[in-house]
Image (cartoon, coloured by chain):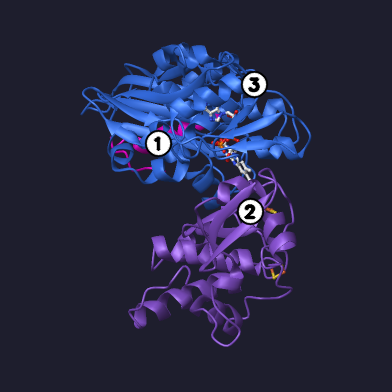
Chain colours: A purple, B blue
């Protein structure tokens, strides 16, 4: 099945089975391994991507559903030369240990801050409730999200969910 | 490999169903794709409803509000009409899954999945939701409590879909309550839950009560006896306690990995006591 969509700002055309999971398309067909697969059943958030700016789980989405959508993966959020403000906050606040959950956490944070630019700690916990982390104990992740939120408020420039 | 179609209209959907009547429908896929992956279902083809415009949105009609079955849970949660009139439903949505699950999952999917733990179901029961079922040949309307007949079992014939949910606008209840008890806050399947609508007089007497429990029976449990027991009495711990044995009798929970039946029965009864927090007559507790 021919599928046309925008992936990290670039129009992309693929010929893949319509029932292939989006996480497999991204990781194996396109070679973007930022989205991780862990549970494969919606529970962990490691496979989070943004679909038209909204967080979704790429393990519960089929290739056919990509048609016409704007997809952002962690590879499209910032670059190594210029990290996205959420990414710099995560590194500065020590919110990253093994890193496996981080692409999902960062994209879920982008979705959260777009809806609520200055969330309370409780709102951050709820907003990231679908993303599990086995390492950090979450405190530093919540610190980082708060910092990212207040920085973008300081600079009065909205966090962009994609490019 | 299975074909996956994404019809953009009901017209297109009927055509697809004519050609492949055994195709499985899905909307958000948060239930169906999990089952497919686990090998629990093996349909020859898939039809995704996410782009059928006629199945989406919330419409404010004369004396009803119509909700398209393929409306996502997060769209509903943020909808001003739902927030203004149906707080009990909004409270159910708020504790369902996680943000990405709510961005994908739909209310129609929650109803047709018919899990005893479905978090929109107790609210839809107390609100007396009517479901609009459509097929190529026409439509019919059925009350949600007649539509859901068992765990995962609904009265839907081949070729029929759930098109929308109708809620009566005039619901005189000032208090809208939903509480779910799970093992943790996010993504927890309910061990027991309760939705309630109450009207309380200025003097603090319960004038009308609608109650429904989730996860403590094969389908949502309603208990007219408990409603009658709290009606006409002050909204207090003492009178709520008197209704607990009636609830414990009405429910028929099972043991599973989340909790055992006896614990579920106890929690179902005790959930009633939370209603005393509304004794000031506001909608704000919980
Ligand atoms: C991690 C995770 C956590 C979850 N947590 C909760 C929770 O806390 N509470 C809760 O209640 N649920 C929970 N769920 C279950 C699920 O998200 C909800 O039931 C959701 O509402 C299902 O909607 P959907 O559109 O994704 O359903 P789908 O998977 O698309 O469909 C489910 C079923 O309904 C049928 N169907 C869907 N739409 C229609 C229609 N319009 N007409 C006819 N048939 C239709 C499909 O054929 C399928 O059989 C969770 C799921 C996951 C993956
Ligand atoms: S891999 Fe998709 S949610 Fe866990
Ligand atoms: S940093 Fe290791 S899982 Fe989160």
Image quadrant for the C terminus of chain B? top left
Magenta stretch contains residue B279: yes
Circle 1 chain: B
**Residue at numbered disc 1:** B53
Task: Report whether the residue tagged 2 is closer than 8 Å to ligand 2.
Answer: yes
* Highlighted range, magenta: B270-286
Residue A32 position within the rendered picture, expressed as x and y whole percent measured from the top left: 68, 67
Q: Are marks 2 and 3 on the same chain?
A: no
Which residue is under mark 2?
A: A58
Cα separation, mark 1 vs mark 3, equals: 29 Å
Kindly tell me whether residue B166 is visible in this rendering.
Answer: yes
Q: Is residue B259 above or below residue A98?
A: above
Q: CA distance from mark 1 to mark 2?
A: 23 Å
- Is B187 located above or below residue A28 in the figure? above
Secondary structure under tag 1 reads helix
Q: Residue at x 50, y 11 (%)?
A: B146
Residue B28 is situated, as x and y percent measured from the top left of the image, at 55, 40
Residue B151 numbered mark, or none? 3
Of badges 1 and 2, nearer the viewer stands 1
Q: State which quadrant residue A135 falls in.
A: bottom right
């Amino acid at each position: 099945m021919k599928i046309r969509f925008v992936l990290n700002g670039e129009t992309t055309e693929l010929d893949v089975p319509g029932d292939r999971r989006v996480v497999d398309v991204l990781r194996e067909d396109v070679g973007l391994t930022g989205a991780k697969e862990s549970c494969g059943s919606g529970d962990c958030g490691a496979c989070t991507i943004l679909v038209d700016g909204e967080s979704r789980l790429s393990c519960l989405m089929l290739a056919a559903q990509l048609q016409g959508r704007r997809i952002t993966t962690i590879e499209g959020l910032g670059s190594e030369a210029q990290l996205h403000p959420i990414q710099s906050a995560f590194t500065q606040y020590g919110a990253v240990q093994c890193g496996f959950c981080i692409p999902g956490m960062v994209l879920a944070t982008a979705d959260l801050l777009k809806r609520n630019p200055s969330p309370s700690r409780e709102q951050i916990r709820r907003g990231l409730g679908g993303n599990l982390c086995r390492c950090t104990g979450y405190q530093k992740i919540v610190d980082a999200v708060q910092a990212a939120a207040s920085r973008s408020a300081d600079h009065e420039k909205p966090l962009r969910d994609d490019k | 490999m299975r074909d996956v179609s994404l019809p953009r209209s009901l017209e297109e959907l009927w055509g697809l169903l004519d050609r492949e009547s055994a195709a499985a429908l899905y909307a958000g896929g948060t239930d169906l794709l999990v089952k497919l992956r686990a090998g629990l279902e093996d349909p020859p083809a898939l039809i995704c409803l996410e782009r059928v415009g006629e199945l989406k949105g919330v419409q404010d009609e004369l004396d009803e509000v119509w909700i398209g079955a393929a409306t996502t849970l997060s769209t509903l949660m943020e909808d001003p009409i739902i927030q203004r009139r149906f707080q009990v439903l909004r409270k159910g949505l708020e504790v369902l899954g996680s943000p990405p699950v709510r961005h994908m999952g739909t209310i129609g999917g929650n109803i047709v999945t018919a899990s005893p733990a479905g978090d929109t179901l107790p609210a839809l029961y107390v609100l007396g939701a009517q479901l609009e079922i459509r097929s190529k040949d026409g439509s019919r309307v059925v009350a949600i409590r007649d539509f859901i007949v068992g765990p995962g079992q609904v009265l839907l014939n081949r070729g029929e879909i759930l098109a929308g949910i109708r809620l009566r606008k005039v619901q005189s209840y000032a208090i809208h309550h939903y509480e779910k008890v799970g093992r943790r806050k996010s993504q927890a399947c309910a061990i027991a839950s309760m939705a309630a609508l109450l009207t309380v007089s200025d003097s603090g007497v319960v004038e009308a009560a609608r109650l429904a429990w989730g996860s403590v029976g094969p389908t949502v449990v309603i208990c007219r006896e408990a409603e009658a027991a709290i009606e006409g009495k002050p909204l207090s711990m003492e009178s709520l306690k008197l209704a607990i044995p009636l609830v414990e009798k009405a429910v028929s929970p099972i043991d599973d990995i989340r909790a055992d039946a006896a614990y579920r029965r106890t929690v179902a009864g005790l959930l009633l006591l939370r209603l005393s927090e509304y004794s000031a007559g506001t909608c704000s507790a919980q």
